[in-house]
Image (cartoon, rainbow, N blue to C red):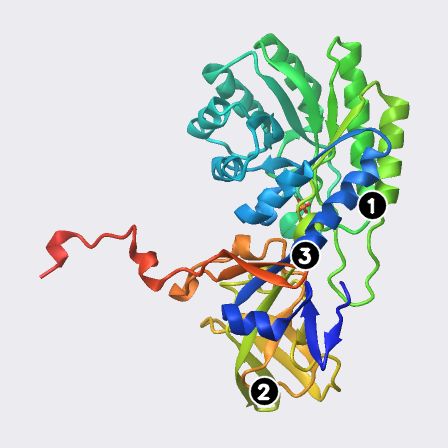
């Protein structure tokens, strides 16, 4: 969690008072700091690139706004895409197909065809996918996602590398699958693992990489030389005050060291999503209602789990502050709850806050990853705005939807209209 400056008890974000941003663009609104975005990319890239040839494939499902993608494109990033929609969105933002890798799960033939038609490399998730791809197109460079049995994550819902999960090729089938791919005429270039999302320790990354190293060397003995090892994403970030941060320099040093020592592979790919965007963005939401419910105090705000689903879906902690009473003495414990008609619609629970009142701006921290990208129209609420700030200037990077747009694709059969 970052610390922020304030002026006259107003929190500053990207060189601007949060109250000014909220007044100008309305609430709820996601606000992203361009400078921080560039810094995060450079930090994680540098941690690996100083040791070996490195490609960072930003996992764009964390935040796929075109302006944010464009900034990362200009930094030299590549892309980890998990759907044809993400592939096309990234190409719209200026990424050429050779900078994108597609890692789907339970991928349809239509999607396999569409992705390979665009010339994007496929990271194959199953033997079924391999056999189906062979009927669509062969002699492609490919990579395989291996389920090493090493999992990690901030919630059970996002541990993707453990034994028995729906993702990837089980370890015991790995070598056989590569041999089958060669038999079918494919050109295996790499090996991939994604352990999960938001884990905070270096250990699982090391364990999973060790397994990929063993497989890489076994493949070499059988005449297949791989060009890259892809360690996936999942680098966690601290959401709570005083929570330690994972040392990406240590991660980069340790991972590249074992690859360089134990294999002939000289290129590493990593796919951080959360790490790059999480702390670049805050969600600004306005207090519209205050309530004392038989002793339980509520701050009612205009963003619910339609806008930020993580607390309701994973029980995630997001730090909150009152942007216009920054640093003021806290008065009591409150729950911050939204306008969605479900009891679970909380953004934060049991937080000490400085006398919240109607009109205050509640700042939800660390909302850049899986924030806007997981938002929905539930309760027929329109998707909110997104704003980019850079050194004291703010620009709209997504307008809010109009209510009418929610009806665009719906039809009432003629016979029901009288
Ligand atoms: C989601 C995902 C990532 C990124 O995970 P983070 O926790 O956001 O870093 C990377 N690779 C794959 C294949 C993914 O599905």
Which mark is in front, 1 or 3? 3
Does any portion of residue 27 appear in the rendered image? no
Q: Is mark 3 within 8 Å of ligand 1?
A: no
Ligand 1 location (quadrant): top right
x then y, percent, for residue 161? 69, 39
Query: What SS does tag 2 mark?
Result: loop
Q: How many marks?
A: 3
x then y, percent, for residue 101? 60, 30
Q: In the rendered image, which quarter contains the N terminus?
A: bottom right
Residue at the disc numbered 1 = 248
In three-dimensional space, the C-alpha distance between marks 3 and 2, rounded to whole angstroms, equals 27 Å
Find the residue positioned furthest to the left: 418
Residue at the disc numbered 2 = 357
**Residue 259, image quadrant:** top right
x then y, percent, for residue 206? 83, 37
What residue do we see at 54% from left, 83% from top? 359
Which mark is in front, 3 or 2? 3
Can you say whether 169 is above or below 246 in the image?
Answer: above
What residue do we see at 73% from left, 62% from top? 239
Can you say whether 289 is above or below 221 in the image?
Answer: below
x then y, percent, for residue 333? 68, 84
The dot on residue 280 is 3
Q: Earlier in the sequence, mark 2 or mark 1?
A: 1
Asked if the residue at tag 3 contacts the one at tag 1, i.e. Cβ–Cβ closer than 8 Å, the answer is no
Bin the neighbour count of mark 1 within 10 Å (Cα to Cα): few under 14, some 14-19, many 20 and up: some
Query: What SS does tag 3 mark?
Result: helix
In three-dimensional space, the C-alpha distance between marks 2 and 1, rounded to whole angstroms, equals 40 Å
């Amino acid at each position: 969690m970052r610390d922020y400056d304030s002026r006259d008890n107003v929190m500053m974000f990207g060189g601007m008072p949060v109250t000014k941003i909220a007044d100008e663009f309305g609430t709820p609104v996601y606000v992203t700091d361009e400078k921080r975005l560039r810094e995060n990319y450079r930090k994680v890239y540098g941690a690996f690139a100083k040791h070996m040839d490195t490609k960072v494939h930003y996992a764009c499902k964390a935040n796929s706004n075109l302006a944010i993608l464009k900034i990362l494109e200009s930094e030299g990033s590549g892309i980890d895409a998990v759907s044809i929609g993400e592939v096309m969105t990234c190409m719209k933002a200026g990424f050429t197909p050779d900078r994108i890798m597609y890692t789907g799960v339970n991928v349809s033939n239509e999607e396999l065809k569409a992705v390979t038609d665009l010339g994007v490399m496929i990271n194959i998730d199953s033997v079924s996918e391999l056999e189906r791809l062979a009927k669509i197109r062969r002699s492609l460079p490919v990579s395989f996602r291996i389920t090493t049995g090493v999992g990690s994550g901030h919630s059970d819902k996002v541990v993707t590398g453990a034994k028995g999960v729906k993702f990837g090729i089980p370890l015991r089938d790995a070598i056989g699958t590569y041999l089958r791919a060669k038999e079918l005429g494919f050109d295996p270039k790499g090996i991939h693992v994604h352990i999960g999302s938001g884990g905070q320790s270096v250990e699982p990354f090391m364990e999973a990489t060790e397994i990929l190293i063993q497989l890489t060397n076994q493949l070499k003995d059988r005449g297949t030389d791989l060009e890259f090892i892809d360690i996936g994403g999942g680098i966690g970030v601290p959401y709570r005050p005083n929570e330690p941060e994972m040392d990406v320099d240590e991660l980069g040093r340790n991972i590249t060291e074992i690859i360089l020592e134990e294999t002939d592979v000289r290129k590493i790919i990593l796919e951080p999503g959360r790490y790059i965007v999480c702390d670049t963005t805050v969600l600004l939401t306005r207090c519209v209602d205050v309530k004392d419910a038989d002793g339980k105090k509520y701050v009612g705000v205009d963003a619910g789990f339609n806008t930020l689903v993580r607390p309701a879906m994973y029980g995630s902690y997001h730090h909150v502050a009152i942007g216009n009473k920054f640093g003021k003495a806290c008065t009591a414990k409150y729950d911050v709850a939204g306008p969605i008609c479900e009891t679970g619609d909380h953004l934060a629970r049991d937080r000490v806050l400085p006398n919240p009142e109607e009109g205050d701006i509640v700042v939800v921290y660390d909302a850049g990853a899986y924030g806007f990208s997981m938002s929905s129209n539930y309760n027929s609420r329109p998707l909110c705005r997104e704003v980019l700030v850079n050194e004291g200037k703010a620009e709209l990077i997504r307008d809010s939807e109009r209510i009418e747009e929610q009806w665009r694709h719906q039809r009432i059969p003629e016979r029901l209209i009288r």
